[in-house]
Image (cartoon, rainbow, N blue to C red):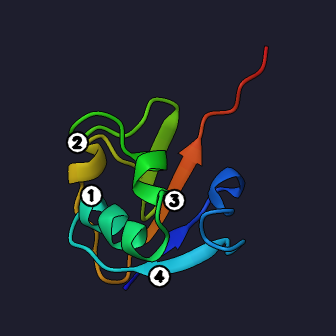
Amino acid sequence: MATVWIPTPLQALTGGEATVRATGGTVKELVEDLDRSYPGFKEAIVGEGVLVRPGISVVVDGSVVKKGLLHPVGAESEVFFIPAIGGG
């Protein structure tokens, strides 16, 4: 199972947990698995089709991914969903 780091704004969906475990061969499958355990998670991450919502970056094993939800995830991967930080 991959380890998923949950950003603070989404921890309300995971009962306050900062890290959770999930299965899936792609980021999309991982998000779907998380949504089964934590309803609303998919809606918070997924935009239209197979796109990650604007303002959220996906990092798998230390690299920002360009394929978004289609990016492969290994059984021992670490996945981060990083929301954009506004400011000026």
Residue position marked by numbered label 3 in the rendering: 80
Image coordinates of residue 34 in percent, x first then y, are 41, 70
Give the amino acid at mark 3.
Answer: Phe
Residue placed under numbered mark 2 in the picture: 50
Q: Quadrant of the C terminus?
A: top right
Residue at the disc numbered 1: 28
- Secondary-structure class at tag 3: strand
- Residue 21: give its label: 4
Q: Is residue 27 left or right of residue 84?
A: left
Q: Is residue 75 above or below residue 48?
A: below
Figure check: 15 above or below 42: below
Q: Which badge, 3 or 4, comes first in the chain's sequence?
A: 4
The mark that comes first in sequence, 4 or 1, is 4
Q: CA distance from mark 3 to mark 2?
A: 17 Å
> What distance separates the C-alpha of mark 2 from that of mark 1?
8 Å
Element assignment for label 2: loop
Residue 5's quadrant in the figure?
bottom right
Residue at 47%, 82% in the rendered image: 21
Select label 3 or label 2 by which is in front: 2
Asked whether 7 or 74 is in front, the reply is: 7
Classify 42 as above or below 55: below
Residues at circles 3 and 4 in contact by the CB criterion of under 8 Å: no
